[in-house]
Image (cartoon, grey):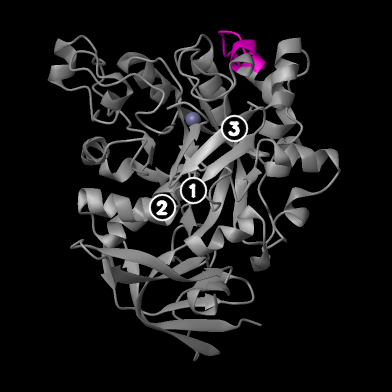
Amino acid sequence: MAHVVQLTNTRLVDGDQLIAQSLWFDSIKGIFVSHPQHAPASTVDCQNRIVAPGFLDLQINGAYGFDFSEDVARLSEADHDWHDELLADNDQPAAREVPSGMQAMPISFAMNREKEESKAVAGSDYSPQNLPYLGPSRSRRPSEGTESLGAHCEGPFFAHNRMGVHLPAAIHASGSTSEPDRVFQTYGSSNLVDAESKERDAGSIPSHVRMITLAPERPGALDTIRQLSDEGIVMSIGHMAADYQQARAGVDAGATMVTHLYNQMNSHHHREPGPLGVLTDTDAGPEMRILGQGTEDGGVKRRPYFGIIADGSHVHPASLRLAYQAHPDGLVLVTDALLPLGGEDGTVDWGSRQLTKQGVSVKLEGTDTIAGSCVTLLECVNNFRRWTGASIPTAMRAVTSTPAAVLGLEHVKGTFQAGADADFVVLSEEAVPGLSSSELVVDQVWKFGVKVYDRCDV
Ligand SMILES: [Zn+2]
């Protein structure tokens, strides 16, 4: 029996517009439905506020004192199920991310903790035990808060001079090649592909790993990109020493994303544009042939999506504008958040190292090395609007429909279309003293058709 709820008096994000239109969802099934023939069971007056699909973050490493790469291993050793133990607890990050509007995420998993390091040094079995605990939530219980859409594995197949704060031992132990066999062995085949679906002839279905970031210039990387993207895993190039041609080759092989554009990759130079140049590719036109870089068939060059950390310290606003203007439909706002997100400023333990949080900035203690951020996705949206002048619905695309498309979930997440998950956010605009533009604030968050956060109740 359907229980249809109608949202009225909304300003609905619809493409690049805000439109005054009702929205309907089935609160039992937790999905949006089209205009019903019968009167809805109930209505919710949105008081002319903005309604956007739930936000998605393609890159988050932890929050609220919790590190997905380390603490999940601790839970797994105790034979606890992360989704039951962690998500059900309102003090834990997944539930607490809800007030910022973030409702789904592939959880970033970095093979950079001591446990992985000691294995790497020993050169023994490298398969991470905690990946199964980071796999898709597959639960539709709204009370669990933010939903995992699978693991985003960052590393260890990086350029050795672009490893950022990832522990060197893990990167070095991966050697200098990225042959498919080696990559499958490292992550564990069962973490990459659901073998049962293959046996049932249901085609390849990604298992616990949804996304992998690797450097395309390493030997064997292009074969790996081809093979894993065929298996349905989103391949992203990053932490790389690739020049323009090597980045282009990675995208031609099947990579559809660039991980945190600008950070841990070659800079743009007018004679060697680096990975940024790939965002400008459209086709192998005459000017490309002059440079000897065109293809004979003149085929369209696919441009990748790109993540960008709009926290004000990872990337200058002008650099964000440059990338956005080069490829507006490809921009995805990500946080790259770490465990101090949501905590007080100061120093916290991070494995064998310490992190110092100051505002949204997180650095390795005593250094100027940026380790990640403490920004929320909503703050990224507000920064993006301020820096580019983008409209509200345009900015919303960078945290809703575009990241959903990266994951191939454009009909399930980040959309109001009938049949999609009824995840949405009700937002207000608030004036900011000293600024001409308004800021968005999250008033309500609804997950699978159930209200899970209301600013008025806090
Ligand atoms: Zn990174």
Q: Is mark 3 within 8 Å of ligand 1?
A: no
Q: Which percent across, then down, holds residue 201? A: 70, 38
Q: What residue is disc 3 on?
A: 354
The Cα atoms of the two marked residues, 3 and 1, are separated by 25 Å
Judging depth in this view, the residue of 318 and 176 nearest the camera is 318
| Quarter of the image where the C terminus is located | bottom right
Q: What residue is disc 1 on?
A: 57
Judging depth in this view, the residue of 455 and 415 nearest the camera is 455
Give yes or no for residue 177 being in the magenta stretch.
yes
The Cα atoms of the two marked residues, 1 and 2, are separated by 7 Å
Q: Which percent across, then down, holds residue 39? A: 49, 91
Tag 1 secondary structure? loop
**What amino acid is found at the position of numbered circle 1 in the picture?**
Asp
Q: Nearer the viewer, mark 3 or mark 2?
A: 3
Mark 3 or 2, nearer chain start:
3
Q: Which percent across, then down, holds residue 290? A: 14, 11
Q: What residue is disc 2 on?
A: 399
Judging depth in this view, the residue of 230 and 448 nearest the camera is 448
Image: magenta residue range: 171-182
